[in-house]
Image (cartoon, coloured by chain):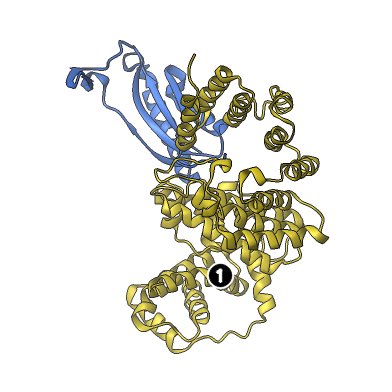
Chain colours: A blue, B yellow
Amino acid sequence: MKFMLLIYNNPAALPAGELEAISQDVDTLIEELQGSGELVGGDGLADSSLAKTVRVRDGAPATTDGPFLEAKEQLAGYLMVDVESLARATEIAARWPDARHGAMEVRAVMSAGADDV
Amino acid sequence: MSEHELNEDLLRELAPQVLAAVLRHHGDFGRCEDAVQEALSAAAIEWPRSGLPDYPRGWLITVASRRVIDGIRSDQARRHREEAAAADQPLVSNEDPALAADDTLLLLFLCCHPALSPSAQVALTLRAVGGLTTAAIASAFLVPEATMAQRIVRAKATVKAAGARFEPPEDRDARLGVVLRVLYLVFNEGYTTSSGPDLQRAELTHLAIRLARMLHALVPDDGEVTGLLALMLLTDARRAARTGPDGDLIALWDQDRGAWDEALIAEGTALIEAALLDRPLGPYQLQAAIAAVHGAAAHERDTDWRQVLDLYGLLDGIAPGPMVTLNRVVAVSMVHGPQSALALLATLDDDDRIKDHHRLYAVRGHLLEDAGKLDAARAAYVEAAQRTTSQTERRYLEQRARRLPER
């Protein structure tokens, strides 16, 4: 089962003293997920101040700077994992360091297949 | 069939026999498995160029054995010489065919070792017994090749760490049960996605059937092995009818039964009828028997729902579970009407294993629709659509909801 783990954090509130420990935790976890064959992919995202928000209204596109929500927490990156269960996906999310400061959102990925009805 | 496809089919068929033979001589599963994969890819290049060797199986065993002995690593030039040499001196196998068959079974047991997770069992079985490349398996499961490669490396290490040996396991019956589950997982992975552009995945269905046929030939007296093969054939018979031209799901009762594959239905029905005669019943046999009842009905209205209900009753007796109850609910509705079915369905409301599952809501939607409670039916379909992780099912359920006029 594939899950997208969305990483939310507040860059301004990241405790500076912990950055090294955080990146250590990330490296350890990524290594484990690669080793187990559960990691499908993942990336970090540039700061949301560099983002563009695009809306098309009445056929006319309007592009504005920044994220469309005024939120302290922003989407900072994502992981895609292929695991045995939702429980395993949430376990991985709980071990991702941003879960301690920000939040991790675990979303099931839709599949094309279907059981008989 | 092109020569290329012929070669590919032959290689896949020979893969488990070659691996079993090499494994019997050299013992190290991880190394032997790698060596056989290398021999298969060497053959895929060499055979179209210089023609099929007189003894393809011997050719592969020779090349794979030398790979193992050489510690696998060697430069390209030497590899080429080895292949040429193997072609010149075919290793004529005079092995007892019964022993070779046993070896293939042992290989299946090894790949379905209980220390492995289901996805690892599937990956290893497809590679070592199915003869698929890592790239093909990765593509079938829609993950990067590196991810699948790592899963296989890890699986082989786990098998080794568990001290698994190439010999009959003590818990043979339990292990055979795991093998059946793995083959069924492979089948479903292919079958449930066998529409649209996912042709790679449809191939999994064929591979599962081929492996089930092979297993049936190895243990013809096991009723559950026969049952699983029959179930696969009877299910696959409906493949062409289960999706529309745009890939949308078509429910069993709306399918064009003329598009069902009669030959597969006949073969599956014959297998399951023979198995039911004189063997202890098992869940795969009962599911196959149910599929055979559906297969026997030329029109949906001809379905012998009373027999389907009896069979679900038996299934509930030997392998009870919420999914079985859910299916029995559908049969109850066809025999006794939607009110009785809704009452049985209500018994699942407190079952944590299924109370949030989309199928429970989908079945409730159908029953409420039959009972004429259209608003409640629409709400159940909408809820089911929100809960499924399948795009195809979501489209189907949204359509069902839209068909009911809002009042």
Front position in the image: A15 or B197: B197
Task: Residue B227 in the image: state x and y as whole percent.
Answer: 70, 56
Is the residue B4 above or below the residue B276 in the image? Answer: below
Q: Residues within 10 Å of mark 1 (few under 14, many from 20)?
A: many
Can the viewer see residue B106 in this picture? no
Residue in the picture at 62% in, 58% down: B265
Q: Chain of mark 1?
A: B
* Image quarter of residue A58: top left
Q: Residue at x 43, y 54 (%)?
A: B200
**Depth check: A18 or A98 in front?**
A98
Image position of B85 (left or right of B271): left
Q: Amino acid at mark 1?
A: Leu
Q: Report the residue marked by disc 1.
A: B19
Image side of residue A83 versus residue B74, left or right: right
Does residue B392 lie above or below A69 as drawn?
below
Based on the displayed image, in which of its 4 quarters is residue B305 positioned? top right
Q: Is residue B45 above or below residue B248?
A: below
